[in-house]
Amino acid sequence: MSDQINSGGGSEQFNKVKEYLAELGYAIVSEDPGEEIMVINDEEASIADMILDCEETILIIEQVIFKVNQGSEQLYKRLLQLNRDFIHGAFVLDDEGGLVLYRDTIQLENLDLNELEASINSLGLFLAEHSVEIIEMAKS
């Protein structure tokens, strides 16, 4: 795997992810080639400020789902149960425990278009099935 910087800025892996996103029709709303981070939006697919971060050998995909107002054992238990319904990725908490995030990690070395598409689509498919429950969780 080569981490050399090319003329477009960012590593070859970063640029490969950018090309895949363009091929999939996602517009990058912001990017930082130096940090190898991109942000995409697609309202129809339930993507809102989804972050794609190329970190050495892995691609980290994250999106904030909701802020935890009052965490409870019942809330955390239900989030863990819902993780079973994800095709790719899972719910996680941020370092402070105040945000519920969708997160997936993918090896960059053998990343292909289908794998990236499946990971991004996983959140939309999940939310299509569980949106009412997730909205209720966010309200509490």
Image: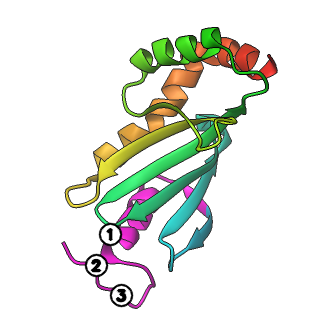
Q: Residues within 10 Å of mark 3 (few under 14, many from 20)?
A: few
Residue nearest the observer in this picture, 73 or 107 = 73
Instruction: Check residue 115 for magenta coloring.
Output: no
Report x, y in % for residue 14.
39, 70
The residue that disc 2 covers is 3
Q: Which residues are magenta?
A: 1-28
Of marks 2 and 3, the one in the foreground: 2
Q: Quadrant of the C terminus?
A: top right
- In the image, taking residue 40 as reference, residue 12 lies left or right, namely left
Mark pair 2, 3: CA separation: 9 Å
Mark pair 1, 3: CA separation: 10 Å
Q: Earlier in the sequence, mark 1 or mark 3?
A: 3
Q: Is there a contact, CB below 8 Å, between mark 2 and mark 1?
A: yes
Report x, y in % for residue 131.
65, 18
Answer with the quarter of the image where residue 11 lies.
bottom left
What residue is drawn where x is 29% and y is 85%?
4
Q: Residues within 10 Å of mark 2 (few under 14, many from 20)?
A: few
Image vertical order of residue 79 relative to residue 88, above or below? above
Specify the amino acid type for callout 1: Gln
Answer with the quarter of the image where residue 71 lies.
top right
- SS under mark 2: loop
Q: What label does residue 13 carry, if any? A: 1
- In the image, taking residue 61 as reference, residue 93 lies left or right, namely right
The residue that disc 3 covers is 6
* Direction bottom: furthest residue: 7
